[in-house]
Image (spheres, helix red, strand yellow):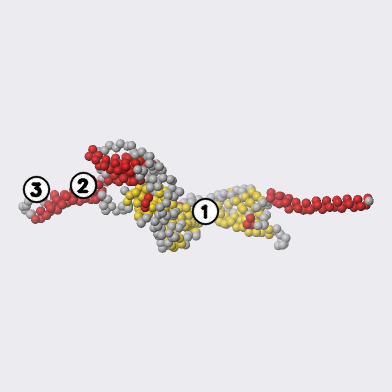
Amino acid sequence: MDRSSSLYRTRLLNKKKGEMLVCLLLLVPYLGAQEAGEVLTVEWYSHPEVPQVHTSWVVGLLVDYPVSRDITVHRPPLPGTLTLESIRTRPRRTGTDPESGNIQTMVEFWFIPHKVGPLTLGSFEVITPDKRYVTEPRSWYIQGEEKREYQPVCSWVNPPQSLEIGERGIAALRLMDWDPQKPWPDAAFVLKELPEGALLEAEPLRGHDQEQGIVLRLGIIPLKGPEFTFKPMRILHEGFSLEIPEFRVQITPGVYPPFPKPKAADIPPLVAARPDTSNLPFPQAVPQVFPWFRVDYEQALYPIQNLWNQGKIPEALGAMRRNERENLAGPCFALLRREAEQTLGLPLTQDEPWRPLKLYRLLLTVSLGVLLFALIAVLLRLGRRKHGFVTSPTFQGYKGIKILLILGVGLLMFAMNGLGIFQPGKAAGQGVLRTALAYRVPEDGGGVSASFSEGQPVQIRAVSDYWVYVESFDGRLGWVARDKLIWY
């Protein structure tokens, strides 16, 4: 009985020991993972140990982790005297036995220092799926000769090979071997002279662009085909002669017709909703009208008031501007128009040039009469040299006739200029917009270049079947649907 009891107790004890051993074996990986998640081994190394100016220099991190793709390294901000050329990651096996050696990961940062003197790199942060390590800052002294001849070279990085009309592409301009003692160039030095045939504008630079030598990201939206060419340029900047090379882009037709008719839809959501103009009071300014011009002023004012009271604000503003330009009482309408635009909260606008049609038509008639009178005088003078019907001393010689001709031609040119005849470089017209979006290309739903509020005056630069290219006084421009424009 005692022997069987002892045997039973021995077996029971052995069973409990086995269960405890199994539990410990199950806990070992978890405890090891917990411990490994808190500690990560990272070692610095530098090649060469003493960096030289203008020479490749490698700063490496030896990470005790085998899977390189799971490692993330956040580097510190770099001083302006140090250029990062590349980042390379590769595995490394420790020990001499290829089967039993531990696998680590080498993360190398390849730099080029540009200045002699002390250099400090901040902390690198190394992150793995279950580990994290932050290095201490470290300092070096850069040796070598600082002065040397720099020869900056410009090149385009991955310019687009082909684009559709209206499609946006980006070409990056890289500047290498730039003198770090001089300020880094901005986009303005390239955008001084730009080719035609496309809309070009500078894109914002990205985080590491300057480290990679990117000085400009040029946005390109072609307007016509079959090819867009950025011609080679030579620019003098900071004492350097920079040669910007050529690149070409093949242009293909877009997916939309060249001038699609805009859809009759509500105002797109990017434009503020049209304000309620039904209750806006008519301008209360009381201009001082010259008595001779009062009839013309009142005859033009009543239709404008009717348009305003009907809520047709753009039409009323267009009529104000037309009378400001052509009516004898034009300055009075300018006073009303300024108050109306201030009520609508429009941005900077300009006054219309005063060219009263009645006055210039009168001058045109007078000039033609003077020229006709001078022509008759010439004929009479030629017909009767000694005695004739014309006995006034003015016509005894040609001096008076010359004065009449000069006066008539001068009045004629002045009148024609006032009426807008034969003016070189004249815009296609003027207009007032309803609330509208302006697009980069004449296509509904294309890239938006600007938005215009109700009543915005614009200059019309080009006209197509269904679109107009407009420009406001503050520099906003783009293609607007033709039914959004009130001509005046």
What residue type is disc 3 on?
A: Ser
Q: Which residue is mark 1?
A: 209
The residue drawn where x is 23% and y is 47% is 360
Q: Nearer the viewer, residue 354 or 68?
A: 354
**Label whose residue precedes the other's in the sequence (1 or 2):** 1
Return the x and y of residue 315 as percentages of the image width and height.
34, 46
Query: Is residue 47 rendered to the left or right of residue 427?
Result: right
**Along the line of sight, the residue nearer the viewer: 483 or 473:** 483
Residue 99 picture quarter: bottom right
Residue neighbourhood size for the residue with mark 1, other residues' Cα within 10 Å, grouped as few (<14), some (14–19), many (≥20): some
> Which residue lies under the disc numbered 3?
392
Helix, strand or loop at mark 2 = helix
444 displayed left or right of 92: left
Q: Furthest-left residue in view?
A: 387
Which residue is disc 2 drawn over? 362
Q: Looking at the image, which residue is at 11% across and 50% down?
A: 395
Crowd tier of the residue under label 2, counting other residues whose Cα lies within 10 Å: few below 14, some 14–19, many 20 or above? few
Q: What residue is shown at x 59% (from left), y 56% (from top)?
A: 87
* Any part of residue 167 in sight: yes
Q: CA distance from mark 3 to mark 2?
A: 27 Å
Query: Of the residues tagged 1 and 2, which is closer to the observer?
Result: 2
Amino acid type at circle 2 is: Leu
| Amino acid type, mark 1 | Asp
One can see residue 47 in this view? no
Provide residue 178's location: percent of width, then percent of height. 50, 54
Q: CA distance from mark 1 to mark 2?
A: 65 Å
Quadrant in the rendering for residue 304: top left
Of marks 3 and 1, the one in the foreground? 3
Tell me the element at label 1: loop
x, y percentage for residue 401?
14, 51
